[in-house]
Image: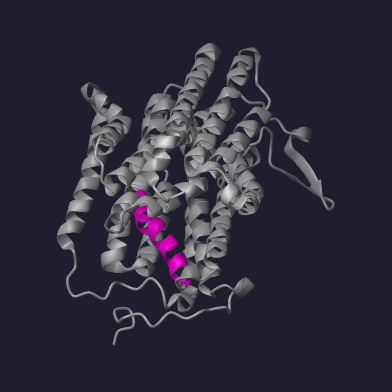
Amino acid sequence: MDPEKGPPPEPVYDTRGIGGHPRGLMTLYFTEMWERFSYYGMRAILIYFMVGSTVDGGLGFGVKKSGMIYGTYTMSVYLLSIPGGFIADNFLGARRSVLYGGIVIAVGHFVLAIPRAESFAAGLVLIVLGTGMLKPSISTMVGGLYVPGDERRDAGFSIFYMGVNLGGFLAPFVCGYLAQGVAFKAWLARSGFDPAHSWHWGFAAAGVGMTLGLLQYVLGRSKLSRVGRPPARAVRPWRVMFLTIFATFALLGLVLLSDLVKGFTWIRYAYLGAPLAAIVWFGLRKDVTSKRVTAIFLFFVAATVFWSIFEQAGSTIALFGESLTDRSLPNGGNFTVLGHTFSVGSPFPASWFQSVNTAFVLFLAPAFGWVWVRLGNRQPSSPFKFVLGLVFVALSFLIMVPAARLSAAGLVSPWWIVGLFFLQTVGELCLSPVGLSLMTKLAPNDLVGLSLGIWFLASAFGNKLAGILAGGFSATDAGALAHSFLVQAAWAMAAAAAILCLAPWMKRLMGDVR
């Protein structure tokens, strides 16, 4: 019998890996680390490449158009995870989906590395398609390494999550330096290369990262032989698959319609309008399932608002860091280590700011895990954790109001952005980990997949709204920029206040789910 198509063997405890975990955990750890390296490395320089002038090798799109494209791209990454997960569960299996998705992602980055205008759209499409295949499947495989009831599971996911953030931390330094580094551009010029093409060296580095992840994934495939197999079924749900793909691309088509046709911008109001209508619809019903679905959509709205601010890190905050922040380094960016002098140039690349959030996650996530365990049953309820997440993300934009006003007098300190990322990371750790867990707990047994899809959709809509909001960024009008930060902070605070007021009702809707 073909081992790829045969029924999986009975699960066993595998304790031969690092720290007594299954051996396959580190294979998946490094696969995800390099995939996130490629994603965050490319994303760290994407907005700069789009707004950069054509003389400097950029696309010269302008802020509004760049924000629109950036939002649609980051939205699509989450949106395509819905059909990608369905295809993996019902056709390919998670193991093949990770392999095929990684290959497509790597090709997409290398296409971006080609210095031609037509390569840009093709590269983004390939990365979106590949990430949609890989993203949901690799987490499924991590869970599959542990048998039901295995107490190592949570610790295994924590280790895996650290790999995600390690890749996200390292990538902007590497890809950002190659794309924007003063010293690297000088080296390109001395070596006979066009320094205006430095962007494409950054994109290529992202492709190399994904390739390294694929190589170690293939070499470690024997450690994953017990997980991620294709489903052993005679009948495949082809009809449901085509409906899922059609619905996903129909939604994406509506988003593109709202972007490209002026008379259809009203569609954007549906990002929050549709889930609010669903809350009213299900909230009027009395059965247990409808109550829980109502709670799911309430959390959906809160998460959408949160991500719409948080995900401006790679757009609005990235542009603020480049245009309005003092990034000069001492000694012109020359450093001596162990008697050897090297130079990164001054100012440092603005894309390096994108590593700050993941650095804070690496430091703060263990502390948050320890606090929640210590509190036990006394820890805040899920609605209140969402309130905390919204409050902290609101505060992060609130502190940018004086920073924006100060920019009228000259470049401001980079510590404003560091402070923003600290507050956003605290908010992320309050809201993000609990969200996915809530979806699985609240969903009826026959709607778990749909509920997870709704959670991905909240991230998708939040990313799209972030791109739209970033389109209004202006580095020349400090008053308007400060007003924008203030208004968005007020909306997040209003959402937090609404969830706080609705918390007693939400707890009743959730029943015995905490």
Decide: is 381 above or below 213.
above
Q: Nearer the viewer, residue 197 or 207?
A: 207
Split into 4 quadrants, where in the image is the N terminus? bottom left
Residue drawn at x 57%, y 36% is: 424
Q: Is residue 514 left or right of residue 296?
A: right
Q: Is residue 192 visible?
A: no
Where does the image place residue 236, in percent across and percent down from the top left? 19, 68
Magenta-tinted stretch: 128-146
Decide: is 464 above or below 24.
above
Decide: is 131 above or below 461.
below
Where does the image place residue 300, in percent across and percent down from the top left? 37, 39
Q: Nearer the viewer, residue 382 or 230?
A: 382
Decide: is 414 above or below 103.
above
Q: Is residue 121 visible?
A: yes
Q: Nearer the viewer, residue 180 or 425?
A: 425
Residue drawn at x 62%, y 41% is: 356
Q: Is residue 447 left or right of residue 123?
A: left
Residue at the limit of the structure toward the right, as seen here: 339
Q: Is residue 51 magenta?
A: no
